[in-house]
Amino acid sequence: QDVRLLGVESVPAGIFTLIRFFIPESPRYLLNLNRREEAANVLRRVARMCGKEAPQGHLVGYEEDLETRNPLARFREILSPEVRSTTWRIWLMAFCAQFASAGFVFAMPKLFESELGLPPKEISLMILLGVVGVIPGLVIAFFAIEWSRKKSVSVFYLASAVGVALFAIATMAAGSVEFAVAASMVARGGMEGMFAILNTIRVEVYPTTNRITAMGTSQVFYNIGGAITTLIFGAMSGSRTLAAVCLSIYAGAYALSVLPALTLPAKSDYAGRAVLDRITQLVPINV
C-alpha cells in the first residue's frame, strides 16, 4: 500500500518534468547573455500563442557577454555589498519558514490523535477543514503584497505564529476540536500567504543574471529547515511536555522571522518597481 501511495505521489513530479521541456527560457535571461536571436524566437512564440504578431525590430543586448561566467562568481555576487544584507535575511527567513511550517504540518495529525483522541478518518477531515484557511490567506496576500513586501510578509509570519500557539492551546489545554480546527485555519492561511510573499521577494531582489543562483541557495535553507524539523518533533512527540516545547519552538521560529523581514533594506522592497537585470545596476544597500 505504501508503495502504491509513493507511485501516485510521483505522478505530478513526472508530469512537471515532461512539461518543463516545453517551457521556453526567459527571453530576459537570454538577452542578458546576448543570445538575442533565441530571445526573439521566444517572444515570437509567445506572441503566436496569444494570437498576436510580434513587433518588428531587433533586440538590443549588452556589450559584456556573461554566458561564460563562473557559477562561483555569481554566488560571490549575492554576497556582495549590493545585496549581502538582503541575502542573509532571506536565508534566515527561508529556514525558519520551512522549519516551522513542515514541523507544524507534521505535528497536527499526531496531536489530533494523542490529545483529542480522534480516529484516523476524523483526523483527515479536520486537517482538510484546516486547509480551507489557505484560500483567505492567499487572497489577502494578493492584495497586501502591493502595500509592502516586507511589512506584509511580517504580518503573515506573525499570523502563522499566532495560529500555531492557538493550536497548542486548543489541543493541549482546552481539548477542543472546533478550536483546534479554527487555529489550524489561521496557521495554514498565515503559512500560505507567507510563502507566497517570501517567494516573490526571493525572485525580485536579485537581478536576472543572479536570480537562479540566489534562489537555489535560499532553497538549500528551505530544505535544511524541513529536514531538521521532522527529526526534532519525532524525537520529542513521545512526551507531552516536549511536544508542547516543540510547538513553542515552531511559533518562536515564525516570530523570530519578523525581525529580518521588517529590517529588509528599503531598496529590496520592489512593490511598484521594476526588477533589475544586472548586479551593476544596483548600488550598495543599507538598512
Image (cartoon, grey):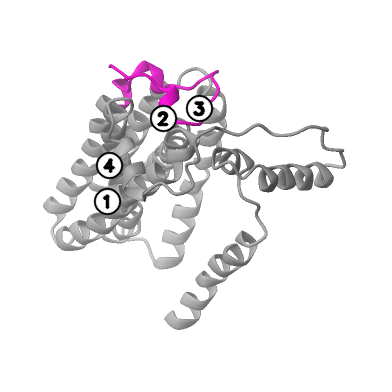
CB under 8 Å between callouts 1 and 4?
A: yes
In the rendered structure, which amino acid carries the disc numbered 3? Leu
Badge 4: residue crowd in 10 Å (few <14, some 14–19, many ≥20): many
> Which comes before the other along the chain, label 1 or label 3?
1
CB under 8 Å between callouts 1 and 3?
A: no
- Magenta residues (range): 261-287
CB under 8 Å between callouts 3 and 2?
A: no
- Residue 166 place in picture, x, y as percent: 30, 37
Q: Which residue is mark 1?
A: 225
> Which comes before the other along the chain, label 4 or label 2?
4
In the rendered structure, which amino acid carries the disc numbered 4? Cys
Q: Residue 276 shows which numbered tag?
A: 3
Separation (CA) of disc 3 from disc 2 = 8 Å
Residue for point 53% across, 19% down: 273
- Which picture quadrant has residue 16? bottom right
Separation (CA) of disc 1 from disc 2 = 29 Å
Badge 1: residue crowd in 10 Å (few <14, some 14–19, many ≥20): many
> Which comes before the other along the chain, label 1 or label 2?
1
Q: Residue 96 shows which numbered tag?
A: 4
In the rendered structure, which amino acid carries the disc numbered 1? Gly
